[in-house]
Amino acid sequence: MWIPSSTTEILSPNAIALGNFDGVHLGHAKVLSQIIGVSGTNKEENRLYPTVVSFNPHPREFFSGQAQLLLTTLEEKVEQLEKLGIQQLVLLPFEQDLAQLSPQAFVDKILVQDLNARKITVGQDFRFGYQRQGTAQDLAAIAAQFNVEVVITPLKTEQEQRISSSLIRTALAEGRIKQANQMLGRPYSLKGMVIDGQKLGRTLGFPTANLQLPDYKLLPRLGVYAVRVSIQNSAHSSLGGVMNIGHRPTLGQNQVIAEVNLFNWSEDLYQQTLTVQLWDFLRPEQKFSSLNELKSQISQDCQQAQEILSE
């Protein structure tokens, strides 16, 4: 995928999907499908580059001054967009000048002049321009002045279930992993490098790999999960396991730690990069009175996870 560093490097003319697309969920996929394989209106424009235009940083982060936790990191977003056929990702620097553009000026200067848009697609709840004054319908009306078609897409499944990044965030926070995965169209995943740990799991008979995750990656509800794990640059296929995301209350620790135990695995994973797909929530984090009690519960967690992953 081409990610231009400035508007002078942009491939054009373009069929553009506008939005942040955090999570790249099934609703987003419907929006993006409108710009795949689209041709222009004349022979010179027989190919329009399917392009996603997003903002960096997220407008919410710009106005609040607080970091926005993400469902998908930039690397993950690029991977999912490529799978859907997107060829170009334009990250517009979201700063004061851009934030103050009126809806009319945004379409004229940014979309038409800078990005050479020939077709635009957005979700039905899209807002843009100064103080989010512009609606998707406003975008269509303004773009029509420049003979640019706008497609407005409902963010729903075939079952008329509404899909949004906010709903997915809520489902993850509540441990409703299956519902979150259903809206995403794939398992929610965490990717990180294995770092040194206390090796307590090894003494309990359940060696774990501690993951170093990006600070801006959204973590689901603290607790234990049934997971499938892939190892970067490895010939091994997806491996089953259990993951604990929590504070280790039995040991009196406060720092949030993500650690995964792989079934039937004994090789060293130190400094390997793992992608962990969350399949189901097993139980919330809890404190045990002894390490033996903890060991017994981990054994039950592993058994339950193996049953879930074998379904």
Image (tube, rainbow, N blue to C red):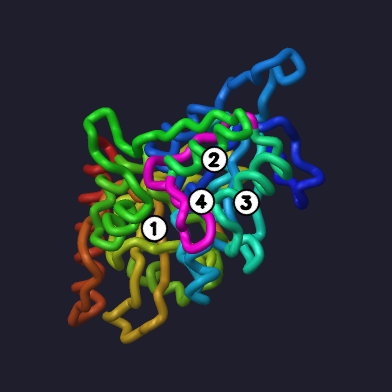
Q: Which residues are magenta?
A: 118-135
Q: Which amino acid type corresponds to the residue marked 1 in the rendered image? A: Asn
Residue 288, x across and y down, in percent: 20, 78
Residue 85, x across and y down, in percent: 57, 29
The crowding category of the residue bearing disc 1, from other C-alpha atoms within 10 Å (few below 14, some 14 to 19, many at least 20), is: many
Residue 142's mark? 2
Q: How far separated are the C-alphas under marks 2 and 4?
A: 21 Å
Q: Earlier in the sequence, mark 2 or mark 4?
A: 4
Give the residue displayed 63% in from the left and 19% down from the top.
Answer: 39
**From this viewpoint, which residue is outermost toward the front?**
145
The crowding category of the residue bearing disc 4, from other C-alpha atoms within 10 Å (few below 14, some 14 to 19, many at least 20), is: many
The crowding category of the residue bearing disc 3, from other C-alpha atoms within 10 Å (few below 14, some 14 to 19, many at least 20), is: some
Q: Earlier in the sequence, mark 1 or mark 3?
A: 3
Q: How far separated are the C-alphas under marks 1 and 3?
A: 53 Å
Q: How far separated are the C-alphas under marks 4 and 1?
A: 34 Å
Residue 72, x across and y down, in percent: 49, 53
**Viewer-nearest residue: 209 or 244:** 244
Give the residue displayed 34% in from the left and 61% down from the top.
Answer: 220
Marks 2, 4: nearer the viewer = 2
Q: Which amino acid type corresponds to the residue marked 3 in the rendered image? A: Ala
Q: How far separated are the C-alphas under marks 4 and 3?
A: 20 Å
Dots 2, 4 in contact, CB < 8 A = no
The crowding category of the residue bearing disc 2, from other C-alpha atoms within 10 Å (few below 14, some 14 to 19, many at least 20), is: some
Q: How far separated are the C-alphas under marks 3 and 2?
A: 10 Å
Q: Earlier in the sequence, mark 2 or mark 1?
A: 2
Q: Earlier in the sequence, mark 3 or mark 2?
A: 3
Q: Quadrant of the C terminus?
A: top left
Q: Which amino acid type corresponds to the residue marked 2 in the rendered image? A: Ile
Marks 1, 3: nearer the viewer = 3
Q: Is residue 157 magenta?
A: no
Give the labeled residue for mark 4. Answer: 20
Give the residue displayed 45% in from the left and 51% down from the top.
Answer: 127
